Amino acid sequence: MTQLGPRGFDHVETWVFDLDNTLYPHHVNLWQQVDVRIRDFVADWLKVTPEEAFKIQKDYYKRYGTTMRGMMTEHGVSADDYLAYVHAIDHSPLEPNPAMGEAIARLPGRKLILTNGSVADAGKVLERLGIGHHFEAVFDIVAAELEPKPAAQTYQRFLTLHGVDPAKAAMFEDLARNLVVPHQLGMTTVLVVPDGSQQVIREDWELEGRDAVHVDHVTDDLTGFLAALRAAG
């Protein structure tokens, strides 16, 4: 049977969410803190200027999926050292979001997180948001054997480990390129974009893909989107 138009949600039994810039608003710019620490890590490790480190950081991010993967591949960096350093940030800008928690709780079925970050950082974010208890598990970069999204094998590891049928799952992400494989696997895909009324700090390529064929739905209000799904159901 040929799929016409965007995939829907009536069949969804597993709800999969990215973490950073997906489960909290882009304009909080929490990731900006991580971004600065990644630059500092690269500069210190490679003994280059912050400006040169920034160029290397963004090049590796785009080519390898994460700067960490690039630093590991090109320079033999330890993942543990890298993750511990770059995630030592202030999470206080995050505020509890009970409305999102309620919207997630009302979704029928399982809820999982698939992140290129670490379980430790995810735990801190979810604690600040007050929504951690709604999720069954967090699949992080360590569980992915340090191979970040959008690598196909990362999604396969996730699906296998948690027994997820992609044909009965939905994926929520803030990067369109991370939805290519999920869509190919049969998942309903949702791109979470910045609120247009708020200033965000992103690379141009990170904001692309809203009209891509592998993006079924686009929203700048995840809580409202999820609430509307349940209201429609």
Image (spheres, helix red, strand yellow):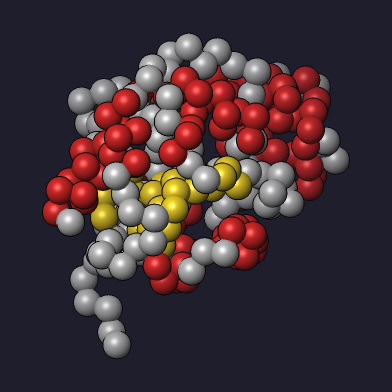
Kindly identify the residue that appears in the image at 44 percent across and 53 percent down: 110
Location of the N terminus by quadrant is bottom left
Q: Pick out the residue farthest to the left.
A: 232
Position of residue 150 in the picture relative to residue 37 (left or right):
left
Q: How many marks?
A: 0
Task: Please state which of residues 130 and 67 is positioned toward the viewer in this rendering.
Answer: 130
Tell me if residue 214 comes above or below residue 37 in the rendering: below
Q: Position of residue 126 (x, y in %)?
A: 49, 28
Kindly identify the residue that appears in the image at 74 percent across and 51 percent down: 145
Q: Position of residue 190 (x, y in %)?
A: 33, 53
Q: Pick out the residue farthest to the bottom.
A: 1
Position of residue 119 in the picture relative to residue 126 (left or right):
right
Tell me if residue 217 comes above or below residue 41 in the rendering: below
Q: Position of residue 5 (x, y in %)?
A: 21, 71
Position of residue 51 in the picture relative to residue 136 (left or right):
right
Task: Please state which of residues 110 and 223 is positioned toward the viewer in this rendering.
Answer: 110
Q: Position of residue 136 (x, y in %)?
A: 52, 45
Res 51 quadrant in image: top right
Q: Can residue 146 be seen in this view?
A: yes
Kindly identify the residue that appears in the image at 73 percent across and 25 percent down: 84
Task: Please state which of residues 200 and 111 is positioned toward the viewer in this rendering.
Answer: 111
